[in-house]
Image: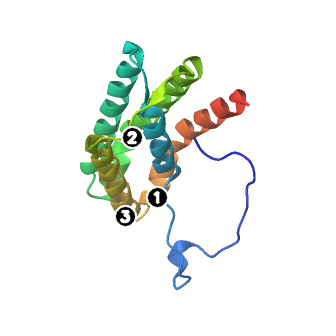
């Protein structure tokens, strides 16, 4: 999950302001997805963790597939509602997986397989591509907003 604790604010010109040498950061959902893979790999012989793993993989595949269909800002705007639904579904799986991990403290960590890495790479590639579109970052961040707020509330309740 994301790091809790100190939040630092930095005043900087916008990325599109030019010549500041600053590369735009990846959207927060990318880091949530990496966290998901860590949780995704927590497993034991229980059928429920296998179900969560399959569900998480299915949501990620749908998300990558949806992103691959987007070729323009108009496409992105048309797909925004579906992307929002998929980001919410992904957060649902992350939360349920974290709850499983908390209820099964003896669960062991498996290593990542090539499928997980390939899916993660595809997602990163597609998100980076869309972030380069005019207005792409804003639309993606808006589509993620509800899901990330839910994740923040869940993490705050855990503490």
- Earlier along the polypeptide chain: callout 2 or callout 1? 2
Residue 73 in view? no
Left or right: where 111 falls relative to 157 = left
Callouts 1 and 3 close, C-beta under 8 Å: no
Q: Is mark 2 on a helix, strand or loop?
A: helix
Q: Is residue 20 above or below residue 72?
A: below
- Which quarter of the rendered picture does the C terminus lie within? top right
Residue 137's disc number: 1
* Label 1 CA crowd tier, 10 Å (few <14, some 14–19, many 20+): some
Identify the residue at horizontal 69%, vertical 45% (top origin): 4
Q: Which sits in the foreground, 18 or 8?
A: 8
Which residue lies under the disc numbered 3?
A: 133
Q: What element carries label 1?
A: helix
Q: Which sits in the foreground, 20 or 159?
A: 159
Q: Residue farthest to the bottom?
A: 19
Callouts 2 and 3 close, C-beta under 8 Å: no
Question: How has the structure been colored for display?
Answer: rainbow
Q: Which sits in the foreground, 134 or 49?
A: 49
- Which quarter of the rendered picture does the N terminus lie within? top right
* Label 2 CA crowd tier, 10 Å (few <14, some 14–19, many 20+): many
Q: Is mark 3 on a helix, strand or loop?
A: loop
Q: How far apart are marks 1 and 3 (CA)?
A: 8 Å
Which residue lies under the disc numbered 2?
A: 83
């Amino acid at each position: 999950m994301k790091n809790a604790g100190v939040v630092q604010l930095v005043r900087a010109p916008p990325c599109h302001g030019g010549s500041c040498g600053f590369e735009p950061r990846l959207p927060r959902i990318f880091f949530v997805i990496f966290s998901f893979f860590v949780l995704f790999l927590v497993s034991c012989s229980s059928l429920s963790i296998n179900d969560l793993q399959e569900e998480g993989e299915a949501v990620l595949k749908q998300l990558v597939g949806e992103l691959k269909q987007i070729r323009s800002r108009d496409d992105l705007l048309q797909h925004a509602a579906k992307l929002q639904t998929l980001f919410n579904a992904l957060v649902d799986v992350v939360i349920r997986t974290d709850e499983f991990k908390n209820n099964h403290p003896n669960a062991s960590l498996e290593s990542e397989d090539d499928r997980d890495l390939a899916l993660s790479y595809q997602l990163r590639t597609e998100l980076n591509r869309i972030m380069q579109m005019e207005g792409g970052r804003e639309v993606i961040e808006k589509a993620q907003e509800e899901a990330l707020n839910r994740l923040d509330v869940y993490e705050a309740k855990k503490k």
